[in-house]
């Protein structure tokens, strides 16, 4: 595990450790207000605050579910939970959960034994996400750390600034924050990697077969840097440092306002893509004549196939792990050789694997709810290998450019151009190969490029939701103003000049520098 996963989440931080200087006044007022609301409701002040941020994925879309590395950043919007632990009592342990946002009514839950918390994933209920983090941590402490003999009860009040349903992972920010609050309330010790795994496992209780990107960045982000996060051979993360001293790159997040409801569309979108990439890996495995697998073996991912490839006769150059860019180019070529460009019907996919259709369905679909008659194996696998390659290329562009000083704006622009080109290529592949874009995402990314972004792409799962655009720091205000004119005010002309609507736009289009991950604030 690299250093960031084995490090510990800061406890005892002050607001100045966590927030940029220009946000400190706002955050100080916000925490003071939260403390006052807490005292109002519970009669005494909180013992501590836990906080964890939302994220924007800069590059590496739909590759975490195939085991490949991603490159997200934490944004400066976060979830804060104020906590006061209660003295031990005989009998059930009670957690009372309040929210500063009146849309989320107060809830209490209790349990008698560690981990015994019921989460009904069929019900869309805000407190589920809190329970996910709570349960995830208590279970993780039981296997890795000091098991909690008897959980403590506590009062908690939540205050979030991550816009919900906007593609910036408000759900994971909440789960991670609750995991950290629960850990600290129990004086538990888990390193970042273990805490992240607790949050990933925990969020699955809410009914989403999530990858691990969102929780990893929310917990592990270091101040000022995006991360490249690896899931193989195990969770690890390295900083991405932009080599600029002036004119730092800023990422502007803009919501198309097309709602992509994963729970509803998963059978034709998210889950179907997972199934397609798994079948593609199996067909390519056969093509490589990989060693026989047990009938009940875990399904291969496209990343697992990399190891098969490296060990096979088809690796004439003797590439090894660690040389990902070269390996990924070879794997893209392998897709061209080993998969047909025409979509595979169920019968054709089964024939390629020399199994029956029933067996194909049992192994690759099983309980996953999908609706499809054919699978676009070539396009999905091509996207995954090319997108995984772009993640390493993005990292390498950042590493290779010489440090810049304020006078060399020409080479700074060339850095931003190179990074922007990779983001644009990612968007093209999401649209043409992975088919996870939509007309509004296309329109918004095109507008962004036309009004000065170096690159622009969808972020998160797609099919709606947000875009992320790379903009030079000095151009951010003008850029945001132009996008408002060209996208939002053209679609909704009445918003212009309407005070409430314009204020609401602050949650719809906003900029963020890479921010810091989870922390426990006690010095406030
Ligand atoms: P969204 O839908 O934006 O939360 C999802 C997954 C990620 C990743 C991206 C696509 C969850 C919680 N998150 O993000 O892990 O697979 O899609 O790159 O499922
Ligand atoms: Mg989400």
Image (cartoon, rainbow, N blue to C red):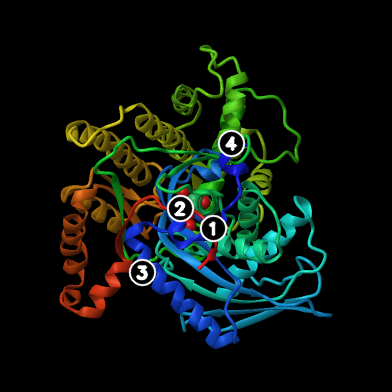
Residue 319 percent location from the top left of the image: 53, 17
Q: Which residue is mark 1?
A: 519
Distance of mark 3 from mark 4, alpha carbons?
34 Å
Per the model, the C-alpha gap separating discs 4 and 2 is 18 Å
Q: Residues within 10 Å of mark 4 (few under 14, many from 20)?
A: few
**Label 1, label 2: how far apart the Cα atoms are:** 9 Å
**Sequence-first disc among 3 and 1:** 3
Residue beneath the point at 48% across and 80% down: 100
Residue at numbered disc 4: 2
Q: In the drawing, what numbered circle is on residue 26?
A: 3
* Quadrant in which residue 382 is drawn: top left
The local crowd at label 2, few if under 14, some if 14 to 19, many if 20 or more residues have their Cα within 10 Å, is many
Q: Nearer the viewer, residue 434 or 507?
A: 507
Task: Mark 1 or mark 4: name the one nearer the start of the chain.
Answer: 4
Going from N to C along the chain, the mark reached first, 3 or 4, is 4
**Residue 516 disc label:** 2
Residue at image coords 49%, 53%: 517
Q: Which quadrant of the view contains residue 161?
A: bottom left
Helix, strand or loop at disc 3? helix
Q: Earlier in the sequence, mark 2 or mark 3?
A: 3
Residue 259 in view in this figure? yes
Q: Is residue 17 above or below residue 398?
A: below
Contact, CB < 8 Å: mark 1 with mark 2? Answer: yes
Q: Is residue 129 left or right of residue 29?
A: right
Which residue is located at x 35 percent, y 38 percent? 242
Could you tell me which secondary element the residue under label 1 belongs to?
A: strand
Is 333 in front, or is 54?
Answer: 54
Mark 1 burial class by Cα count in 10 Å: few <14, some 14-19, many 20+: many
* 233, above or below 257, in the image: above
How packed mark 3 is, by other alpha carbons closer than 10 Å (few <14, some 14-19, many 20 or more), is few
Q: Quadrant of the N terminus?
A: top right
């Amino acid at each position: 595990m690299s250093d960031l996963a084995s490090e510990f989440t800061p406890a005892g931080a002050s607001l100045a450790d966590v927030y940029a200087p220009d946000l400190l006044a706002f955050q100080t007022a916000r925490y003071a207000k939260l403390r006052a609301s807490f005292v109002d409701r519970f009669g005494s002040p909180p013992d501590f605050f836990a906080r964890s941020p939302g994220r924007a994925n800069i590059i590496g879309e739909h590759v975490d579910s195939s085991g490949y590395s991603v490159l997200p950043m934490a944004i400066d919007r976060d979830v804060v939970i104020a906590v006061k632990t209660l003295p031990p009592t005989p009998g059930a342990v009670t957690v009372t959960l309040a929210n500063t946002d009146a849309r989320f009514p107060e809830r209490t839950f209790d349990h008698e034994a560690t981990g015994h918390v019921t989460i009904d994933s069929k019900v869309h209920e805000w407190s589920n996400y809190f329970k996910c983090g709570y349960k995830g941590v208590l279970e993780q402490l039981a296997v890795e750390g000091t098991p909690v003999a008897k959980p403590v009860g506590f009062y908690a009040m939540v205050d979030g600034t991550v816009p919900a349903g906007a593609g910036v992972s408000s759900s994971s920010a909440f789960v991670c924050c609750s995991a950290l609050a629960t850990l600290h309330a129990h004086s538990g010790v888990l390193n970042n990697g273990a805490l992240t795994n607790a949050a990933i496992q925990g969020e699955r209780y809410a009914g989403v077969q999530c990858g691990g990107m969102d929780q990893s960045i929310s917990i592990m982000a270091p101040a000022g840097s995006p991360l490249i996060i690896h899931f193989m051979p195990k969770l690890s993360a390295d900083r991405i440092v932009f080599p600029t001293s002036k004119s730092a790159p800023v990422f502007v997040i803009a919501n198309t306002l097309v709602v992509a409801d994963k729970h509803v569309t998963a059978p034709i979108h998210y889950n179907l893509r997972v199934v397609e990439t798994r079948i593609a890996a199996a067909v390519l495995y056969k093509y490589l004549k990989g060693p026989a697998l047990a009938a009940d073996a875990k399904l291969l991912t496209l990343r697992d196939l990399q190891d098969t490839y490296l060990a096979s006769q088809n690796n004439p150059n003797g590439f090894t792990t660690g040389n990902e860019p070269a390996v990924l180019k070879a794997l893209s070529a392998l897709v061209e050789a080993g998969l047909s460009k025409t979509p595979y019907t169920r019968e054709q996919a089964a024939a390629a694997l020399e199994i029956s259709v029933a067996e194909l369905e049992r192994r690759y679909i099983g309980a996953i709810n999908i609706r499809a008659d054919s699978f676009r194996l070539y396009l999905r696998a091509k996207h995954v290998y090319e997108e995984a390659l772009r993640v390493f290329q993005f990292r390498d562009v950042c590493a290779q450019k010489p440090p810049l000083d304020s006078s060399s704006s020409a080479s700074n622009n060339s850095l931003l151009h190179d990074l922007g080109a990779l983001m644009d290529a990612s968007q093209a592949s999401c649209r043409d190969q992975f088919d996870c874009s939509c007309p509004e995402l296309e329109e918004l990314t095109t507008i962004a490029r036309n009004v000065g972004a170096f690159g622009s792409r969808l972020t998160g799962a797609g099919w709606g939701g947000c875009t992320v655009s790379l903009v030079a720091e000095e151009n951010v205000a003008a850029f945001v103003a132009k996008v408002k004119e060209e996208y939002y005010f053209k679609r909704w002309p009445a918003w212009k000049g309407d005070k409430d609507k314009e204020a609401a736009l602050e949650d719809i289009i906003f900029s963020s520098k890479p921010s810091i991950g989870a922390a426990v604030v006690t010095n406030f």
